[in-house]
Each structure stands twice: as structure tokens, then as C-alpha cells.
Amino acid sequence: MQRRDFLKLSLGGLALPDLLALRARAGDGPGGFGKAKSCIVLFCWGGISHLDTFDLKPNAPSNIRGTFKEIPTAVPGIRIGEHLPGFARTMKHWAIVRSAHHNAASHRSGAYWNLTGHQPEKLDKNWPASRKDWPCLGSMIWQAKGATKNTLPGAVALPYTIYDGGVANGQDAGFLGMGMDPAVFRPTGEGLRIYQGKSPSSGRIDLGLPEGVSRQRLEQRRGLIHGFGQTKGAAIKLEAEALARSREMALDMMLNPSVHAAFDLEKEPRALREKYGMHICGQSVLTARRLTETGVPVATVYCAAGDLNGSKGSHFDTHADNFNKLKNNMLPPFDQAASALVEDLRERGRLDETLIVMLTDFGRTPQINKGAGRDHFPGAYSAVFAGGGIRGGQVYGKSNSIGFEPAEQACGPPDLHATIFHALGIDPEHMIYDADNRPLPLCDGKPLPLF
């Protein structure tokens, strides 16, 4: 079989991790609340405007409050933006955090801080993604929980990798090594409305057998795979073994009917698929739900696409025409998919065991610029939680009268991550090891009192 056939699952940038235990688990076991068994992260790439979604300022001057109106929600006293009707309808399940902040003003640094929970190397500039970076949230959860019990990886991302003049930092396993990189999948299906400006590297799952290769022949190839790791030199040997195990995992996924079933969205009722939305955002979120049902601990859905360099594509980096872009392109699919997910999980009896969290790079400037847009603003932004033992129908924290800074209960990315670990029963002080074998705690934040 050709190498490209073994790596068929990596078409378009798919990084298939192996199940190699690169480090023994440290610590004495779970130390959190622990009601959640899995986590679905909805990441609004580009920096979603808190002032136009979850933290409107209707009494601020017009050059700050913008054109969107507040609407009531199912929880008296909680009001959000008019273009989030699904969140408003399901607000009894959501907890809004309005006091998040940090000081990293570039996309890749802000995303890195929110995806890893750790301060970026540079606060206002890009730097090349490398194995010296901190692992992403998915890889840390995978490492802390250990290997999955099936042939699926312990962390997945959908439907694209995110870019800003290059691959955004904080999406892979960093110093944990490629063996714990999340696999990047794209849901299959015809007629899906996709984001404009598709990211340069997009995940694509293809579980069909390579042309002209039978199932029996694939089974016969297992013995050959094991020979890939027989090489001299510790570093080369480890890399070869990781590649060999990745190839073996690819074969397992091709041959396993349960894996095929997890990705087969046609098994879902058409009405449910339409409820999530027949677009790449909705079907990615639905796929994330199906994967967590099969035992994948964490799935991250990037609810945007396009390389932010040049501001082309469907993303939340709304420097110009903020209100039309949010109203017409970005908020409808995000709101539809997120609200469908929380209702679907509730109806299945899985909401208490599945944590949902919305994260983003940062917020947007209170002052509307001359292009009717809002610019980068890490001084205040919102995050949203549901399920996993979270007490819904609440607001934590408060920004000041113009959304410029936290006014009450300020928190940062480490606290958001500590809350996620706490919900999953993972001690935020659980130790992982960097490339120099130094022990480092997963997180230095404190869980927010949302439970």
C-alpha cells in the first residue's frame, strides 16, 4: 500500500494522533466536581463582540452601544442581543461570564491564551507554532483522562484548523508531542453551506477503503506497520513509533464499523440535522455530540473559518461592517447550532454529563470605528457555559458601563480553564511534563463558582 493510502485520513491537514502514552499520569486522581464525562468547546475565532451578543450596553452612547437591541430571555432579568434568539430561548441552561479579560491584543496570542489557559510568548505579535507551545485544552484533557477505550482519538477538532498569517498557536498538543494532537475532522455530506474563506488546511475524514484495497489486505498490513518503529536513535525511534501507531490507528478506524457509525450523520433524523442547521457549523457541532457519545473526551468546534490575515472569510474579526457581518453571516449559524446542542443533550439525558463552553480570542472595542466595525479588545469579553453540572440561568461578573473592563468578579483564561477541569473531575494542579521533563500544573487558575 502507498504511504498516501495509509494516511488517507490526513487528507487536507488531518492530524491523526496515536494512542501512545507519552507520559505516565501524575497526581493522585480526580480533584474536581467531576460531573461531566466530556466537553464540547465552541470557539468563536476572530474575537466575538461581547457588546453585541452577551453584554450589551443599551444605555451607553450610540457610538458604543451600536445598532443591536437587547431582548429578554427565558430567565427574568437576563437580557442578551437580538440576534441570539436560540440562546435567549435556552437561557435557563446557560451561565454567562461577563468579566473575562487578559492583555493579549493579537488573534494568535489571544486565542493561544484561551485555548491553552497559559500566557502567550508574545502579547501583541505572532510567533511560529512549535512543540515548545503549551498543549491545547483538548490535548491536556486527553492526557489527564488517559487513553480512550476505542479506536477514536482522545481529542478532536472540527471542521478546520484556524489561521492568521499562518497556523494559529495553541491548536495542537505542543510539548506533549504529536501523539496527542487532536485529530481535525470535517463532517461529510452534500449540500452543506460552508463558511466563506475556508481555512488553508481543512480537516477531512474519509473512512472508505483505498481504491483496489480489500478489507483483508488492510488487515495483512498490520504486521508491516510494526516494522516502521524498528530504527536506531532514541529521537528517531520515538518519531517512527508515533507515525507507525498513527498509521495503525488509521487502519483501525477504517475497519471499525462503530467508528463509521459515529461519523454517519445520515443516521440522525433529518429534522434534527436541520435543527442544528444544514451548514458546516451546525453539522460540525452535531458531529461533536456524536463523537463525545462514543467516548471522545473533548471536541473543539471552530465556529468560523478563513485566514484572518487580510480579514477575508467568515469569522468574528469584524474590523469593518461589524453589525451586518454578525447579523447576516456569523451569529445565525452559531446561535442555531449552540441552542440545538443544549436542547438535544437535554432531551437525551446527557446534558449533566456533557460540559459545553464558548470561548473566543477576546472582545471588541467599545468605540465603533469609522468603518462601522469594532477592533481587537482583550480588556473585557464574555464566555458562556452549559451542562456538566453548571447552574444555568445565571450571570457571573460584570463589565463597566461601556464594556471596557471588568467591574465585578474579574477572571481570566486560567480561571475559565480551571472551571472546565473542575467540571470534568480533573485537578487543575494535575502535573504534565514539558520537553525538558519538567513537571508543570495543567492550570494556575481557580474554578469559577458556577456549579
Image (cartoon, grey):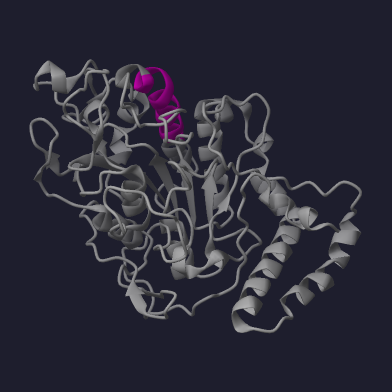
Residue 322 to residue 133: above or below: above
Horizontal side of residue 328 vs 186, given as left or right: left
- Nearest the viewer among 207 and 345 is 207
Q: Is residue 365 magenta?
A: no
The residue positioned 14% from the left and 34% from the top of the image is: 403
Residue 448 to residue 93: above or below: below
Whether residue 389 appears in this view of the structure is no
Residue 327 to residue 167: above or below: above
The residue positioned 73% from the left and 55% from the top of the image is: 7
Residue 408 to residue 148: above or below: above
- The answer to which image quadrant residue 314 occupies is top left
Residue 95: percent from left, percent from top: 26, 42
Count of numbered tags: 0
Which quadrant, please, contains the N terminus? Answer: bottom right
Horizontal side of residue 16 vs 67, given as left or right: right
- Nearest the viewer among 407 and 241 is 241
Helix, strand or loop: magenta stretch: helix
Residue 149: percent from left, percent from top: 60, 66
Residue 437: percent from left, percent from top: 42, 81
Q: Which residues, given as a range, are shown in magenta?
A: 325-340
Whether residue 415 appears in this view of the structure is yes
- Nearest the viewer among 410 and 120 is 120
Q: Is residue 329 magenta?
A: yes
- Nearest the viewer among 150 and 412 is 412
Residue 169: percent from left, percent from top: 42, 53
- The answer to which image quadrant residue 65 occupies is top left
Horizontal side of residue 144 vs 376, given as left or right: right
The residue positioned 37% from the left and 67% from the top of the image is: 426
